[in-house]
Image (spheres, helix red, strand yellow):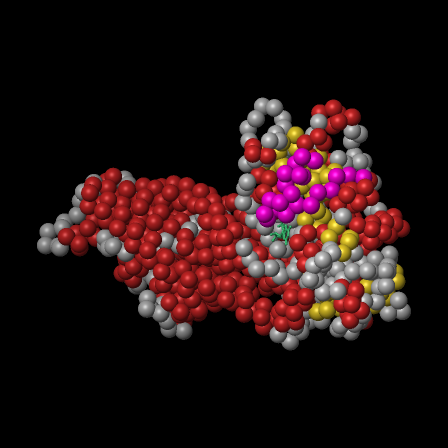
Amino acid sequence: MKTASLVKLHLITLVGPPNSGKTTLFNQLSGKNFKTVNYPGSTVEYSTCKIQSKFGIDADVLDSPGIISLNPNSPDEEVSINSLYNHPEFGSPHLLVATVDASQISRHLLLAKQLIESGFNVIVALTMNDILAKRGFEVDENKLGEELGCGVIKVDGRSGRGIDKLLSCVKPKLNDDEIKERNSPHKVFENISKEKLLGIYKEIERIEKNVIVEIKNINAPNLLQANEKLKILNPTLKYGSNRPDELTLKIDKYLLSRRWGLVFFFLIMAFTFTSIFWLANPFMELVDELFGYLSTTAAGFLGHTWYSDLIADGIISGTGSVLVFLPQILILFLILGLLEDTGYLARGAMLIDKPLSKIGLNGKSFVPMLSGFACAIPAILAARTISNRRERLLTIFIIPLMSCSARLPVYALLIAFLTPPDKAWLAGIALAVVYISSIIGSLIVAAFINKFNKKIINAVDSSSFILELPAYRVPKIKNVIRNSFENAKQYIYRAGPIILVLSIAIWFLTYFPNHSPEVNTTGLSHEEAVHLIKAERLSTSYASDLGKIIQPVMSPLGMDWRIGVSLIAAFAAREVFVSSLAMIFKVTDEDNLQSSILFAMKDAVNEETGKPLFTVPTIVGLIVFFIFAMQCLSTVAVSKKETGGWRIPILQIIIFTSIAYVFSLITVNLLNLAGF
Amino acid sequence: MKTASELNFGERAIISDVDNSHPSFRRILEIGFTPGQEIELVNSSSFNDPLAFALRGTLIAIRKHEADCIILS
Ligand SMILES: Nc1nc2c(ncn2[C@@H]2O[C@H](COP(=O)(O)OP(=O)(O)O)[C@@H](O)[C@H]2O)c(=O)[nH]1
Ligand SMILES: [Mg+2]
């Protein structure tokens, strides 16, 4: 993101309470499109970017996680506050642009005042003026500027209104001489006393009364009368802005109703996850046919040579068998994005705080856990918003159990094997069952760890849940769509090379050394001959040598080394399991990639026992394995970084992988006993 | 002495003090529950905890035991 430049540019940091419009302003200044989320604390990482050249200022801007005051309360706030004094990578900012929500000025001025008093170089950007205007009021920016002793500019980051004015105010502040003369800011607000805090608030309330003025000549309802009707108790409040958004209150009557709140919660979650399947279906078929077509065309074009096999089977079928699931992943991002943008997530966190706190988690674990369904890596970062260390570590611990999008291709293939192709709804239900099992599994693991093992997570401090419930908002569809495509693209960039390289590696291991085996094909049809050659080649391949080592582990599961090799390959990235199966089992050249894999799987025979390899018990056993196994190297790396050591990631690998093996062993054998 | 956790739904009251022996008291103050402010209990989760209060033009959810440190007049 950061432009490589020799001269160090001036740094402007955007700082403000959560949901005050920092990221919106950042996107406007940088011309980028970062996700704005209607959940407090959604920006946990920094993004920096050069200000767009059209604004004529040579400086970097930095978007930071929201903070309420200069007294940190959770890891993300601490990082954010320390970076105001000295950012580990970008140095100390030359100027702070403090965002203040005009419609909540009495809460948001606390931080701005603390920043100014600490000696930072501050300009206040007043956002959400339209919301205040709807109530019939506006802020007198000049008066507020005088009161605070700094520049105050009204902006709307969505339309870009006021940005020019803001920047014309920024420019002189970045003057080198002025910057040199400034003293470095001092830390005065850590463990601030109650008296001091109340003193600042008194001052803010005085300022508020001074700067908020009624907008004349509009058809707004007479608010003094409205206040009378609402029987506002506080006589000093002359305007109605201490009432939350009316529409939000109405919606919450239902969504937060004590009787129906949980029902709505489960319905919303169920809809989110089932829609992945049925919405994505038509798109998947398109991608599938495309790759099937590419593979047969390539094979036809290149003839029967080893490089034809490499390109058609290794590269096209291998990567294609995974990319078929891209539409599902895209739709998962899309729906999570829409949900995030509405403001419902904070309610979800509140609704399940109580049950989660019973097993050592926190309502604030909900959003990280939910984003774990897309990918564990951002989810583990999102756990920084949890202030209690023990709850945060426990949340990180169980996040890998959330069914991330990398598992979707695996589940989808395995479920497609179990359900008839004309009944997509059945597959949807099966997938929902898998997701629910993974949630229940993770909660049980959390409860066990919380109860029995103080050694795994040995941190204690007081648990708390204080969360702002933002006003509901219609999600900005265009933004969400753009972001989902961006996410899907990043997914391809991140997972694509791994899948490609491993596909080629697996192809190599299964093709050599005996690439043109001597078999007697007299009297066999062409298809049977190809089948025989392929089987002979595989059973004398490097992969088979490797496979013999793991055969003892696989036998109790009713599986053979071919699945074992695929499972090992899946430790680099789970999707590789699918491409590996495709290469090991696929024989027929059909137009449709997925159905040809399924077809080959139905034919496959366990080399040890001679019975069919893929049966209901082994398929369900594999699903169970994937629900629990910790199979992603990047997750291990992030878990180490965020927990500050190897202990938790190593325990995750050991505990989850043994649970995976034992549970799938039990599942396979129980189902076999039951006669499936 | 009544605390915010004892409010009925839809009931409004004015904060008189915040108990500073409570571990979360500073965050409670910082988020805007200060003496003199009017609050209203608006919603709660289905488990009656946490509670959602209207305060200073927004909604804030806090646990019951945190609402206990908000003393009403
Ligand atoms: N009505 C209104 N909404 C705004 C304004 N500025 C930002 N928003 C919205 O407020 C929400 C929170 O903004 P965001 O930039 O994510 O806040 P952050 O948490 O401070 O980064 C987003 O949905 C924005 O679209 C504004 O001036 N008026
Ligand atoms: Mg943000």
Is residue A159 placed above or below A441 in the rendered structure?
above
Query: In which quadrant of the rendered image does the C terminus of chain A lie?
Result: bottom left
Percent from the top left, x then y, of residue A474?
Answer: 57, 60
Image point (58%, 42%), residue name: A28
Q: Position of residue A175 (x, y in %)?
A: 71, 27
Q: Is residue A503 visible?
A: yes
Q: Is residue B8 left or right of residue A456?
A: right
Looking at the image, which residue sits at the far bottom? A259
Which residues, given as a range, are shown in magenta?
A: A149-169
Seen at 70% across and 69% down, the residue is B44
Q: Residue at x 78, y 29 (%)?
A: A182
Farthest residue, direction left: A523
> Between residues A305 and A332, which one lies in front from this camera angle?
A332
Q: Quadrant of residue B33?
A: bottom right
Quadrant where the image shows the N terminus of chain A? top right
For the image, the number of numbered tags is 0
Q: Is residue A628 above or below residue A193?
A: below
The quadrant holding residue B12 is: bottom right
